Image: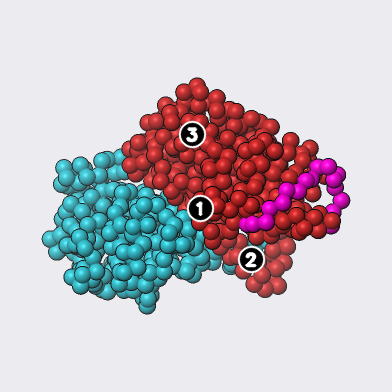
Chain colours: A red, B cyan
Amino acid sequence: MRIIVDAMGGDHAPEVPVEAAVKAANTLDIDIVLVGDENRLKSELLKYAYPSDKITIVHSDDVITNYDEPAMAVKSRKTASVVVCANLLKDGEGDAMLSMGSTGALLAAGLLIVGRIKGISRPALATLIPTKKGPAMLMDAGANTACKPENLVQFGIMGDIYMKNVLGIKRPKVGLVSNGEEEGKGNDLTKEAYPLMKKADFNFVGNIEGRDIMAGETDVIVCDGFVGNVILKTIEGMGIVVASLLKQIFLKNVITKIGALLVRKGVSDFKKMLDYSEYGGAPLLGTKKPIIKGHGSSNVKAVYSALIQAKKFVETNVIEDIKNSILEGNIND
Amino acid sequence: MRIIVDAMGGDHAPEVPVEAAVKAANTLDIDIVLVGDENRLKSELLKYAYPSDKITIVHSDDVITNYDEPAMAVKSRKTASVVVCANLLKDGEGDAMLSMGSTGALLAAGLLIVGRIKGISRPALATLIPTKKGPAMLMDAGANTACKPENLVQFGIMGDIYMKNVLGIKRPKVGLVSNGEEEGKGNDLTKEAYPLMKKADFNFVGNIEGRDIMAGETDVIVCDGFVGNVILKTIEGMGIVVASLLKQIFLKNVITKIGALLVRKGVSDFKKMLDYSEYGGAPLLGTKKPIIKGHGSSNVKAVYSALIQAKKFVETNVIEDIKNSILEGNIND
């Protein structure tokens, strides 16, 4: 198996992607294609020992950033790292791709170059979020700000398959984000989606409210990309505030510092729970080949986790299963 | 000043509303009208000492619950406590009203009985949420699942006035919830609202993301009621999870319990920050008279806080200021 890595994307590129790629080449049964500035990547790779046949470099001399208009940039800048990656993926030069760069550019490259699975009208960004009972999948986390009811049903189907295959959850509970649990609650979009989701071939548990998300009773949390993005960032923001307040509490004086020492194991577990890097990246579901978006601020551990995730994404045939699910008539285009 | 209290609404009615009313009659310069079952209220009041002229009872023999269809119930059940309260408020028998009962019923009573301020097409539920830098106002928190751009502008205007008058914030920062900070980001609703909010007569700071909310840089957080409800409940849910995880950490064994003792002041401050009861209730903004929704699970402290808030709501002429702001042409109906 070969994973294509956009080595120029993210806050710590190319150092972090290269170090994570080396770690993966040394420990996982995968080959890596690093896409980026050949000279910089070569000099980074010189720092490490690894089986030289497991990492190859494909040169690219341009990087699309968050400041570029994604679709336009992807269409016009053929030598940008994310564009080169997507073309390699499309041409079968790798089995999956990973980028820590601009989300918009990755989505555009996925849609315009790799292409949608036939029958899936809107691929979605599916983020794993921390909950009290382990990771849950939030989708769409920001790819589609305007959705139709059928899109939400497809998100449910794809999320169900991903959580079954990659995370090994037997019968994932799929919930629809709303402003109340009763079937009649919601906005126009969710009210129309509800009966369709009831009929769909997954374990639909009905509407879920914001307070249910972190409780972890639902495995796949379905909403449009605007709402999903707001949820994701609200959780992130609250995590940051909670962490900083705890730090204040513990660092206040000598007594509290001793207190902190006495509970350090628990606090470290707590931080670990809120730590995104444990969960790898966000799969883009609905494209013809596996694509994963890593967090822009990913450290080596996070990129390495995302590579493990990409491997499972391929091995467990998520995309074949989504295709089959559509053929069986679960989805209308 | 006289505040009308729906003594039958909420999880702990009538005990908690009555006890809070007594506390208010004894400590604040206000009179209270308790609306509910006369016999039950009388026997509750017998438990306490208070100046008898400051609390009066108006009998009602029906209660609308969360299981009733709000608008229909408000129209047909004239002796329901929330309906009696709203009629008293409309008829000038009190200066403000407070209910811990069904949110839907209170909204319906506010709209159908008390009525909208001329020019305000959609009154909104405005909730104070905890942030790192003190309370911020989230509106709409659930009254309107479908909004037009003009509604969001009006939410900004009303929230601005409330935060100035009641919370004493000099120049409240008003932000629009979106999936990105740039002006071009958002769904159709927020993209259309953005230029209108830029022109409005308040301190518009542009789009804000979920992660900015808890950081507390924005005083008035504007969004439609579906998104607002999801944000509010996500924060609530995360607060519950964080509190339960901290408890687990501290109660693990003797050592961690000693640790907990050493940081107890900080943890108690932290819990206080996340404690809704500190912030009183949620004002419904846009009706002709002050209406406040208390949390259904409110304890005495929370109801008492909401009564203080109702008093400030009246004293600081929020409603007059909203009316004037409309007359000055800030709002188009």
Instruction: Name the quarter where the C terminus of chain A is drawn.
Output: top left
**Crowd class of label 3 (few under 14; some 14 to 19; many from 20; radius 10 Å):** many
Element at label 3: loop
2 and 1 marks in contact (CB < 8 Å): no
* Disc with the residue nearer the chain's start (1 vs 3): 1
**A92, A161: nearer the viewer:** A92
- Up-down: is A104 above or below A163? below
User: Can residue B203 be spotted in the picture?
Assistant: yes
Q: Same chain, marks 3 and 2?
A: yes
* Residue plotted at (69% across, 60% down): A12
1 and 3 marks in contact (CB < 8 Å): no
Residue B210 shown in magenta:
no
* Disc with the residue nearer the chain's start (2 vs 1): 1
Please give the chain letter of the residue carrying mark 2.
A
Tell me the number on the disc at residue A90.
none
- Up-down: is A246 above or below A170? below
On the picture, is A329 further left or further right than A321? left
User: What kind of residue is marked 1?
Assistant: Met
3 and 2 marks in contact (CB < 8 Å): no
On the picture, is A118 further left or further right than B100? right
- Stretch of the chain drawn in magenta: A47-63
Whole-percent x, y for residue A171 in the image = 56, 29
Please give the chain letter of the residue carrying mark 1.
A
Element at label 1: helix
Furthest residue toward top: A328
**B32, B209: nearer the viewer:** B209
Please give the residue where the numbered disc 1 appears in the rendered image.
A72
- Up-down: is B319 above or below B19? below
